[in-house]
Amino acid sequence: MANRLLESIEENPVIAAVKDFEGLEECLHTDVSIVFVLFGDICNIGEIVEKIKEAGKMAIVHVDLIVGLGGKEVSIDFIKKTTKTDGIITTRQALIKHAKEVGLFTILRFFVIDSISLMNIEKQKNMVQPDIIEILPGVMPKIIKKISEISSVPVIAGGLVTDKEDVIGALSNGAFGISSTRKEVWGM
C-alpha cells in the first residue's frame, strides 16, 4: 500500500485536506487522488472514509483531530477495524509505531515553530520511521529544502499553502507533495 500511495503523490502532488462535509463533497469531484481527513468523530468517520473510497480516492485520517479518539493505541485499532482508511496522520510517535504494526500508511506531522523543533525532526522520525513526514507551515521554502535534504523519507508541506506560488515554492524546494484545505489549490 505504501508504494501505491507514494506513486499517487508522485503523479499528483496536490493532496486535498478536508475540514468539513462541504470540503469533503467538493474534493470528491476533483482530480486529487488522496484526501487528508481533518474532521469527524467516532460516529461518522467510517461514513466519511467510505465516501472518499467510493469516489476512487485514498483516505488518510488525522487521528488527533477525530472527536472521541484519544492519544492511545486503541484509537488506531478503532480506525483500522471500523473504517477502510489507507493510513493515518498524527503528531504522536507511539501512534505511528502502532499504526505501522497494524499495516496502515503513516504520516508523522511536525509543526516547525523554531530551531529546536527543526533539530528534533530527524531524531523523532528515526525513532518511529513513518512512511512520510508532513511539516507545517508549508510556506517556508528554505526550511522545506533543509528538511528534504536531511530526511530519508518523503516530505509533504502543509498548512498555509494557498496559491500556485506556495505550491511551486514547496515542490521546487524538495517537498514530495503538498496538502491544502484551499479548494483553489486542489485543481493545480
Image (cartoon, helix red, strand yellow):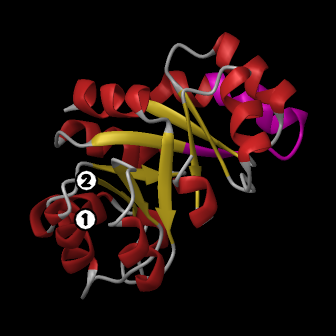
Residue farthest left in this picture: 81
Asked if labels 1 and 2 touch by Cβ distance under 8 angstroms, the answer is yes
| Image spot of residue 119 (x, y percent) | 78, 26
Name the one closer to the observer, 69 or 62.
62
In terms of image quadrants, where is residue 105? top left
**Disc sitting over residue 73 in the figure:** none
Disc 1 element: helix
- Looking at the image, is 135 positioned above or below residue 67? above
Neighbourhood count class around disc 1 (C-alpha, 10 Å): few under 14, some 14–19, many 20 upward: many
Residue farthest bottom in this picture: 43
| Image spot of residue 132 (x, y percent) | 46, 32
The residue shown at (49%, 26%) is: 127
In terms of image quadrants, where is residue 53? bottom left
- Mark 2 and mark 1: Cα distance apart in space: 6 Å
Q: Is residue 117 magenta?
A: yes
Residue 46 visible to an observer of this rendering: yes
**Over which residues does the magenta segment extend?**
109-122
Residue tagged 1: 52
In terms of image quadrants, where is residue 26? bottom left
**Disc sitting over residue 57 in the figure:** 2
| Image spot of residue 142 (x, y percent) | 86, 25
The residue shown at (44%, 41%) is: 107
